[in-house]
């Protein structure tokens, strides 16, 4: 009997489709993907896609980003309700108000944002490119939306800029506390702790390394440490255990699970391929404006 994975592979070939999956997806979704990566890597893959259809196993803003970079292609998000609370925290109106308050500032928008917000921004960034993007701008004032923690991390590293942050946050990373860090440190005193910059400044201060999802993975795989604490979504731990089972990987906190990223199942991917649901559709004008800010990021 043909398995669901075999059906997906067969249909993907028939429909000339590319399956992209974020590291935070369940391991079974990662297994059937053509490429697994973080936001920046997936944006690059989406832009380079030769296939007619992109099935994006992630959350809404990621699929929107793929559509912005490939307006002529069909982009499908297998689960319509897979959203991002952080992306929903900032609106285009919020950004416009900030621009009026700080007319000389450049607006740097984290990719974890809606197409409307990207459309009123000067340039986008990911957690891996944030320092490079902000450092590349001539403006002394930077409006950074929507993630306050990442914005504060950037401000700490680039001292010659005034970074005005928005009060947005990732619930998964923000719910990790200093107490969580102290407890895991006590249990694993010799372990290397790698943490995502979406965590609070207090948690970052107690880590051994701060980096994007891909940077955390690279550091973990290259490290000589046998015990490694991962301070980002649990999907990264699952990925690393599969990639290098000779090391011990521990999640910084059991609270680090993104329910939206876990909504996608194999059945959803199969249904998406069969029925072309749920297709991402954006207005041509919105795509054009948002494309500029995303493309500037890619060029940097």
Image (cartoon, rainbow, N blue to C red):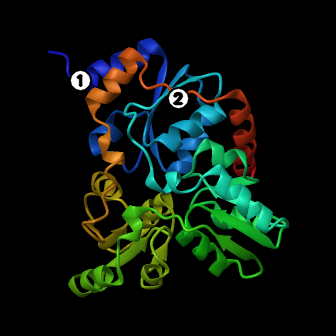
Q: Give coordinates of residue 130: x percent, y percent.
A: 64, 63
Which mark is in front, 1 or 2?
2
Quadrant assignment for the N terminus: top left
Label 2: how many Cα within 10 Å (few below 14, some 14–19, many 20+): some
- Residue 25 higher or lower than 56, as above or below: below
Q: Quadrant of the rendered structure where residue 172 is? A: bottom left
- Residue 64 higher or lower than 127, as above or below: above
Q: Give coordinates of residue 218: x percent, y percent.
A: 46, 61
Is mark 1 in CB contact (under 8 Å) with mark 2?
Answer: no
Quadrant assignment for the C terminus: bottom right
Report the Cα–Cα distance between label 1 and label 2.
24 Å
Q: Is residue 176 left or right of residue 248?
A: right
- The residue located at (25%, 58%) in the rendering is 245
Q: Is residue 31 left or right of residue 93?
A: left
Q: Give coordinates of residue 29: x percent, y percent.
A: 32, 38
Q: Give coordinates of residue 53: x percent, y percent.
A: 51, 22
Q: Quadrant of the rendered structure where residue 52 is? A: top right
Residue indicated by mark 1: 4
Label 1: how many Cα within 10 Å (few below 14, some 14–19, many 20+): few
Dot 1 or dot 2, earlier in sequence = 1
- The residue located at (59%, 40%) in the rendering is 65
Residue indicated by mark 2: 280
Q: Secondary structure at mark 2?
A: loop
Q: Is residue 60 left or right of residue 282?
A: left
Between 249 and 210, the one nearer to me in the picture = 210
């Amino acid at each position: 009997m043909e398995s669901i994975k075999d059906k997906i592979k067969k249909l993907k070939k028939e429909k000339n489709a590319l399956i992209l999956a974020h590291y935070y997806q369940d391991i079974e979704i990662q297994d059937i993907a053509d490429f697994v990566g973080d936001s920046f890597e997936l944006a690059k893959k989406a832009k380079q896609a030769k296939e007619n259809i992109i099935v994006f196993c992630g959350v809404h803003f990621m699929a929107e980003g793929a559509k912005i970079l490939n307006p002529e292609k069909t982009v499908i998000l297998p689960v319509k309700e897979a959203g991002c609370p952080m992306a929903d925290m900032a609106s285009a109106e919020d950004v416009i108000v900030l621009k009026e308050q700080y007319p000389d500032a450049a607006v740097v928008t984290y990719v974890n944002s809606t197409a409307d917000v990207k459309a009123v921004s000067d340039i986008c960034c990911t957690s891996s490119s944030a320092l490079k993007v902000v450092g590349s701008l001539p403006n002394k004032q930077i409006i950074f939306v929507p993630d306050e923690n990442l914005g504060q991390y950037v401000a700490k590293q680039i001292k010659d800029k005034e970074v005005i942050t928005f009060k947005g946050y990732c619930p998964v990373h923000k719910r990790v506390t200093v107490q969580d860090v102290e407890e895991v440190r006590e249990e694993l005193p010799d372990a290397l702790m790698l943490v995502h910059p979406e965590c609070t400044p207090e948690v970052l201060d107690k880590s051994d390394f701060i980096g994007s999802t891909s940077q955390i993975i690279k550091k973990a795989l290259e490290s000589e440490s046998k015990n490694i604490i991962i301070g980002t979504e649990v999907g990264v731990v699952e990925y690393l255990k599969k990639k290098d089972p000779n090391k011990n990987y521990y999640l910084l906190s059991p609270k680090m699970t993104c329910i939206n990223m876990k909504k996608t199942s194999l059945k959803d991917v199969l249904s998406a391929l069969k029925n072309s649901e749920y297709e991402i559709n954006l207005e041509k004008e919105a795509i054009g404006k948002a494309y500029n800010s995303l493309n500037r990021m890619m060029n940097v």
